[in-house]
Amino acid sequence: MSEHEVTVTINGEKITKKVEARTLLVHFIREDLALTGTHIGCDTTSCGACTVIVRGKPVKSCTMFAVQADGADIETIEGLAAGGELHPLQEGFWEKHGLQCGYCTQGMIMSAKGFLAENPNPTEDEIRHGISGNLCRCTGYNKIVEAIQYAAEKLQAAEGGE
Amino acid sequence: MIPGAFEYHSPTSLDEALSLLKQHSGDAKILAGGQSLIPAMRFRLAVPSTLIDINGLNDLRYVEERGDHLAIGAMTLESSLEDAAVVRQSYPLLHDTALVIADPLVRNMATVGGNIAHADPANDHPATMLAYNATVVAKGPNGERTIAIDDFFTGLFENALTEDEILTEIRVPKPGAGSGGAYTKFERKVGDYAISAAAVQLKLEGNTIAEARIGLTNVSAVPMRAPGAESALVGKSADAGTIEAAGQAAAAECDPSPDLRGSVDYKRDITRVMVKRSIDKAVARAKGGN
């Protein structure tokens, strides 16, 4: 068994832990760091419920070993609300009814955060392409697209106002 | 699902990776993007005792034209391929392919070299690289060698690399004047493997097809070209009759397995349609369209 010391900066907090090489990043986040907002859905790299942002890019944390994240900046859903105030994406999902059971929601939000950083003013098609790695079994996606449009507009307005 | 235990190494240079590979010869796997290997390890379909993670080899991440070809570093992310201006402008077949590989999250980790080295007939790059007549560059303890893509895929998940070699680069020939290419994929949903997909790269002289290469995805045990479909095109005028004949030839020569994605007959017919759509688009692009 090979054990490794892994240091990550997760939602701004630097943490060092020992992990076994085979520990998947999602298990490290949920079990070692006790951040259970990141979900495990399919366990087959299909559903995107485990999406987190690693080194600025949204990825499936079930398809990466924790040891690979050594030295990385990681963002999870827990890091989004600043000072108790919802992030525009969270607010968008609330306002536009972007969730029903909520299981996929954090993955959707982290994916959207990732692609909005690169394309802050996406078309509807670009949003659909952007979340195409995230499955939702409830909403039919339309409300999720509206939620992301809401957030994009709000983020753009905040940007313009500064 | 938890993968089996393994020893983990993360070399910072290609030479270090090669020496680790030699040292653990026979039971080590190279970890590139991991988007096929890690799922296989979770299912315990793969239980390597050593993983050599080459994600630290950032000098294997590049996409640029060099002389007569486009050089793609093996560790280039699929997402960077999707974003590369040179790919969008001059390699439409490759751009089409980059847009439909797995899903955007997977493309943020998955690498071009990994997609090819995995030698999975269900992966998309094999067909595309066969259509482009690409060259694979491999490095081993005895130096570098090049392998023609036609000789690269030797079996299901098997390639021409020796145990101590690492795929370092893929070279795609620059398409000449009058060239066009396209990739068309039929899938149940984003992220699933293709039911069938066709990569076409051709060259027109006037309205006559002077050269054509066609690769097929997920309709054979080993990534395959469609030689019958290619010869149905070459020397012929690019009209509907010729294109239908090529589609029918591909349907006849592919060798799909029945599975949850469909029966053999269904997959053959989808292959006919994918080939025709790719040829149509390739011809339109060769004439200057999109």
Image (tube, rainbow, N blue to C red):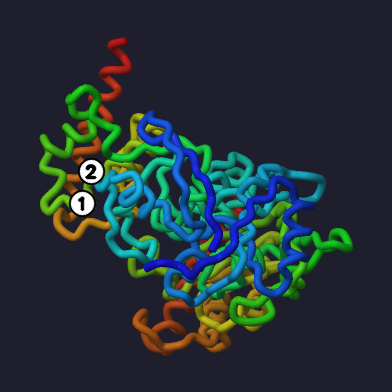
Left or right of A46 on screen, residue A7: right
The kind of secondary structure element at disc 2 is: helix
Q: Position of residue A47 (x, y in %)?
A: 31, 59
> Are the two marked residues, 2 and 1, in contact with CB atoms closer than 8 angstroms?
yes
Q: Is residue A56 visible?
A: no
Above or below for B241 versus B136: below
Q: Position of residue B91 (x, y in %)?
A: 62, 51
Q: Quadrant of residue B150?
A: bottom right
At label 2, the amino acid type is Val
Chain identifier of the residue bearing label 1 in the image: A
Which residue is found at the position 28% from the left and 39% from the top?
A77
B175 or A4, which is in the foreground?
A4
Mark 1: few/some/many CA within 10 Å (<14, 14-19, 20+): some
Which residue is found at the position 73% from the left and 60% from the top?
B20
Q: Quadrant of residue A112?
A: top left
Q: Position of residue B131 (x, y in %)?
A: 65, 67
Give residue A145's mark.
2
* Quadrant including the N terminus of chain A: bottom right
Q: Is residue A2 visible?
A: yes
Chain identifier of the residue bearing label 2 in the image: A
Left or right of B199 on screen, residue A134: left
Left or right of B33 on screen, residue A106: left
